Image: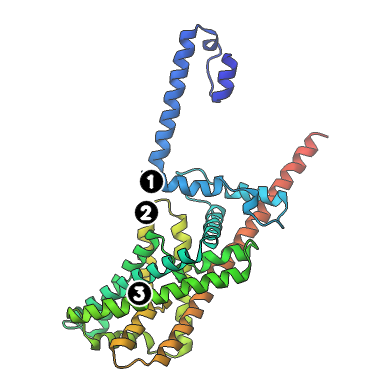
Amino acid sequence: MPQDIDSHTNQQKDPQASFTDDEHLADDSDKEGQQESSSNDNVDDDANDNVNDNTNETKVTEDLKDNDLPEEISDEDKETIKKVANDDNLSHAKSYASILVEQVMDAKETFERSLGSLFTSAFTAGLEIGISFFMILSAFALLNEVIPSHYAMVLSSLLYPIGFIIVVIGQSLLFTEQTSLLSLPVLNKIEPLHKLLRLWGIVIAGNIVGGCLFAALMVGLGLHMHLFTDHAIDVYAEHILGFEWWVIFGSAVLAGWMMGVTAWLVTSARDTLSRIVLVTIITGSIGFLGLHHSIVGNIEVFSALLYGNTVSLWRYLVFLAVVLVGNTVGGVVFVAVLKNRTFLFEIEKVKEQTADAKARVDVRHR
C-alpha cells in the first residue's frame, strides 16, 4: 500500500518512512493535501488573479478533440497539432500554436451561432463603436476653438480606442476585428467559404445598421446639446474623405492589418488589463495616423451625410465599399494567411523532430 501511495503522488519519499505505522501514513496524506493546495495557490498567483479567464482559455487547447479538426487530416497530424497547441503553463506566454488553435476554436463557435445572435451582436458593436466618434468629435470641437485645427484633430484622435475597448472586452462582433479570426476555419478546411461570406455579410450589415442608427440618434443629440456643430462634422468627414480612392484603399489595408494584429494579441493576453492596454495602443495608433476603419468611418461619413453639407450619398457608398475591401484584404492576407502558414511550418517541424526521435529509439533497440 505505501508503494501505491508513492506512485500515485509522484513524489520522492524516504523509503524507511513508508514502512512506519498508520499514524505516519496519515501525516504523509495530510502533507500531500497541503502540497496540492499550495500548488493550486501558486497557479492562481501566476495567473494574476484571473482564474476564470485563464481556465477558459486553457481548456480551449487542453480539450481539443479529433473531431474539432478537419477529417482530411491524418491521425498522426491531429496528434501533432494537439501536442504543439497544448499550453497549460499559466506562468509563461502562450505558444504560437496555442493562440492560433484558440482563435480557430472561437471562430468555429461563431460559425455555429444563430443568425439572430450574430446580427444582434454585430448591431451592438456598431452602436458601441460610435462612442469613439462621439467623444472624438466633441473633443475636436472644443479644442478647435483654442488651437489650430490640425493639432485639435490629432489630440482628439487619442480618444479613438474607447469604443474598441468596449467592443473587444464586451465580445461583440466587429467586422475588422473578426475578419482574420473568422477566415481561419476556412483556411484550414474546417468550414466552407460560402458560410464565411454569409457570416461576413451578417456582421457587416449589423455593424453598419448599428453605426447608422448611432449617427442618426446620438450625433443628432450632440448637435442639440451644442457639443459640436455641423461645421465640425463636415471638417472631420473631409479629414477622412479628402484622398484619392487608392490612398483610402491602402490606408484601409493597413488598418485591417493592425486590427487583425489586435485580435491576435488580445488572444495571446492572459488577463483583461493586458487586453485593454493592447487594444488602446493599437487602435490609438490607427486613430493617430488617421487610417481608414470601415465601421468607424461609416459613422463618421454617414453623420456628415445626415447633418453636414459636403457629403453625397454616392460619395458615402463608394467610400464604404473601398474601405470594407481594404480592411478585408489587410486582415485576411497579412494576418490570417501568414499566421496560419507559420503554424503549418511549425507542425512540419514537430513532425520531423518526432520522426527523428523515433528513428533514434529504433536504432537503440536493434
Q: Secondary structure at mark 3?
A: helix
Whether residue 263 sits left or right of residue 65 in the image: it is left
Q: Quadrant of residue 157?
A: bottom left
Identify which amino acid the numbered label 3 is placed on.
Answer: Gly
The numbered mark, 3 or 2, whose residue comes first in the sequence reads 2
Question: How many residues crowd around disc 2 within 10 Å: few (fewer than 14), some, or many (20 or more)?
Answer: few
Identify which amino acid the numbered label 1 is placed on.
Answer: Asn
Instruction: Determine whether 118 is above or below 239 in the image.
Output: above
Q: Is residue 352 visible?
A: no
Question: How many residues crowd around disc 3 within 10 Å: few (fewer than 14), some, or many (20 or more)?
Answer: many
Q: Position of residue 16 (x, y in %)?
A: 54, 10
Dot 2 and dot 1 residues touching (CB under 8 Å): yes
Q: Which residue is depicted at the point 39% across and 57% down?
A: 275
Q: CA distance from mark 3 to mark 2?
A: 22 Å
Q: Nearer the viewer, mark 3 or mark 2?
A: 2
- Residue carrying label 1: 50
- Residue carrying label 2: 272
Q: Secondary structure at mark 1?
A: loop
Q: Position of residue 139 (x, y in %)?
A: 22, 76
- Residue carrying label 3: 287
Q: Residue furthest right?
A: 366
Q: CA distance from mark 2 to mark 1?
A: 8 Å
Instruction: Determine whether 168 is above or below 87 in the image.
Output: below
Question: Foreground: 241 or 124?
Answer: 124
